[in-house]
Each structure stands twice: as structure tokens, then as C-alpha cells.
Image (cartoon, rainbow, N blue to C red):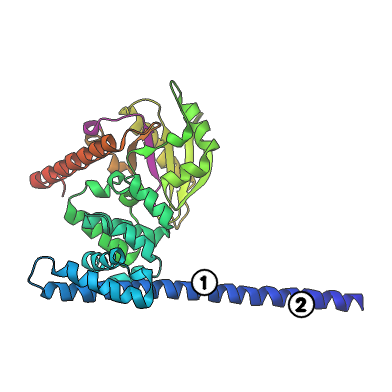
Amino acid sequence: MKKIEIIAKESDKLLFNDIRALIEQARGGVAQAINSGLVVLYWSIGSRIRREILKGKRAGYGEEIIQVLSGKISAVYGSGFSRPNIFRMVRFAEVFPKGEIVSTLSRQLGWSHFAEIIQLKDPLKRDFYAEMCRIERWSVRTLHKKIGGMLFERTALSKKPVKLAELELRKLKEEDTLTPDLVFRDPYFLDFLGLKGAYQEKDIEAAILREMEAFILELGAGFTFVARQKRMQVGPDDFYLDLLFFHRKLRRLVAIELKFDKFKPEFKGQMELYLRWLNKYERQPHEESPIGLILCAGKSEEQVELLELDKSGIKVAEYLTELPSRSALETRLHQAIAHARERLIAKEQTGEGK
């Protein structure tokens, strides 16, 4: 009798869990459908108003339309259709003119995501954040933080000529294909490590291990920690890689070396050895070739360019343990972008980039 009661209880528990899972799944689907519907509705409203505004010949015609409409619609449907919100809807339709793109993005991005993105003036930057939101499923808070931390300006994508960058983003949209230029940054912000004054490489590594969650957040979505001080035996000698990660979207191992001083040309040979060892002994059949990231306190762009590190699958980036002011950071990153684009254009003109 007791056995039958136990079986009945287990059956009831299983039934309850199954029903609860169905309810939660349905709730999630309903919430997503409502969110997607709201986004498409706001875009449609903005698009319709924008068409009306474009008919007007007088200055201030759009202002008048929105003022009148917001009063009438708010009286019926509430504050969600206030004058500022309707202006956002018109801006939304202006910077995302294609409804099919909005429909696709709305499956992952809510109205609050779009409200952040439409404030950006650069179309390339808007596309970048929209697609990265979609691919990596950022929350609104994460998106706000990424924009504030100038993530776009820290990617290699931002340093490419606009047409090449647009092609890479189009590939991301159409094929969901992430490239290293979208994944890796320069510089990396390591202010959360709390390193002050004089410190050594072992101090950086210890601080990263202590703050691993924050470090992975700065690296970006898709990184999984594999090992620290990875031992590599080459003949009679042992070598130790500081940190080893795996990136799921890139499907490759990522070797990270930490340097407390500026980049030196000999770092290239060291990283090439590590990558070839990983390629021979650790790489799985379905994976791409391992890639290396050398994090330094500083670097000479000319040295990095002359060494052609990209051909060896090596990225070099600076890290900042103390953040400069926002204006200083903007100046620094915008100068780096301008110089990088100039170098790439010069290479194409001389035929070196082919």
C-alpha cells in the first residue's frame, strides 16, 4: 500500500512539474509576442507619421502634427503615447526604415533596447549594437553599459573602412557569423581588478582569477574559462600559458598572455609557439584554429603592423587598470580609429591589402 502511495506522489509531482513547465513556456511565449508586437506597432506608428510629415512643406509642420496627435492618442491610450515617446517612434522609423529588419530584431530586442540604440548618430554603430544585442541577447542594462564603455570604438571593426565594416555586419545579419574583429577589443577595461601602483604579471593573473566573472563580462559573451598556467611540454622544456579560454561562437581556443609592460616583438614568437602546440595537441576536429590575445600595458602600432600578427592569428590589445576621463577616452579611441582607417586605405592604394 505504501509503495502505491509513493508511486502516486511521484506521479503527482511529475505531473505538476510538467504542467508548470508548460505554463512557464507559454508565459514566456506570450511575453515575447507582446514585446515583439509593441515594437512593430511603435515602428508602424512612427513610419506613418513620418510619411505625413514628409508631405508638409512648412517648417515646424512635424512638430505641430506630433503635438496634436500625442494629445489625442494619450487621452485614449495613456502616457505611452506622450509627445517624447511619439518623437522616439518617428526617430525609430527614420533610422530603421525597413520593416522586415525591425520585425527580425524585435524577436530579441524590446522597445527599451531600441530607445537606447536610436540615440546613436552613426548608422554603423547602430547596426553593430542592434546585431550584438540580437546575437548575445543583452539586457537593456548591458546594452547601456556597452554603449557607455564605447565597445564599438574598441573593436577592430570600427577601425576598418566603412564599406568593409558594413560587409562584415551584413554577414553577421544574414549568417549569424561572428568574426574575431567583432569579438576582440582594444583596449580592455580592467579597472575592476583594483590594481594600484606597482604590480607584476602574477598580480594581474591572480586578480583576474579572483574577479573571473567580471573579466569574462569584459571579454564578452561566448567565452568559457578552460585553464590557468596551462602546461605545454615541448621536448625537454615546459612552457606555461597564462590563461586559456574557449569561445563558443568562434569555435576556437583562445590563448591569453598577460604582460605588465609594453608590447615587445619577441612576444610574437612565444605566442606562435603556444598556438601551434594548442593546434597540435588540444584542438578538436570540429574547431577552428586557436587564436591568441596578448594583453599589454602599451604597444607601438607600427611594430604590430610590421609583424603582421593577424596572419599568425594573434591579437594585441592594451589594458587599462585605471580609466581615463570620458573625454580623454573618446579622443584616444577616435584618433586610433582614424589612424587605423588611414593605414588600411593606404595599403589598398599601394596594393598591399590585396
Range of magenta residues: 288-303
In primary-sequence order, the first of circles 1 and 2 is 2
The residue that label 2 is drawn on is: 11
**Within 10 Å of the Cα at label 1, are there few (<14), some (14-19), or many (20+) other Cα atoms?**
few
Residue 285 position within the rendered picture, expressed as x and y whole percent measured from the top left = 46, 56
Indicate left or right for 99 with 203 as reference.
left
Residue 153 position within the rendered picture, expressed as x and y whole percent measured from the top left = 27, 45
Q: Residue at horizontal 28%, vertical 37%?
A: 329
Residue 301 among magenta residues: yes
Residue 154 position within the rendered picture, expressed as x and y whole percent measured from the top left = 30, 44
Mark 1 or 2, which is nearer the eye? Answer: 1
The quarter of the picture where residue 73 lies is bottom left
The residue that label 1 is drawn on is: 28
Indicate left or right for 220 with 238 as reference.
left
On the question of residue 297 being in view, the answer is yes
Residue 228 position within the rendered picture, expressed as x and y whole percent measured from the top left = 53, 37
The quarter of the picture where residue 43 lies is bottom left
**Within 10 Å of the Cα at label 2, are there few (<14), some (14-19), or many (20+) other Cα atoms?**
few
Secondary structure of the residue carrying tag 1 is: helix
Mark 1 and 2 residues: CB-CB less than 8 Å, in contact? no
* Near-viewer residue (71 or 87): 71
Which amino acid lies under the numbered mark 1 shown in the image of this protein?
Answer: Gly
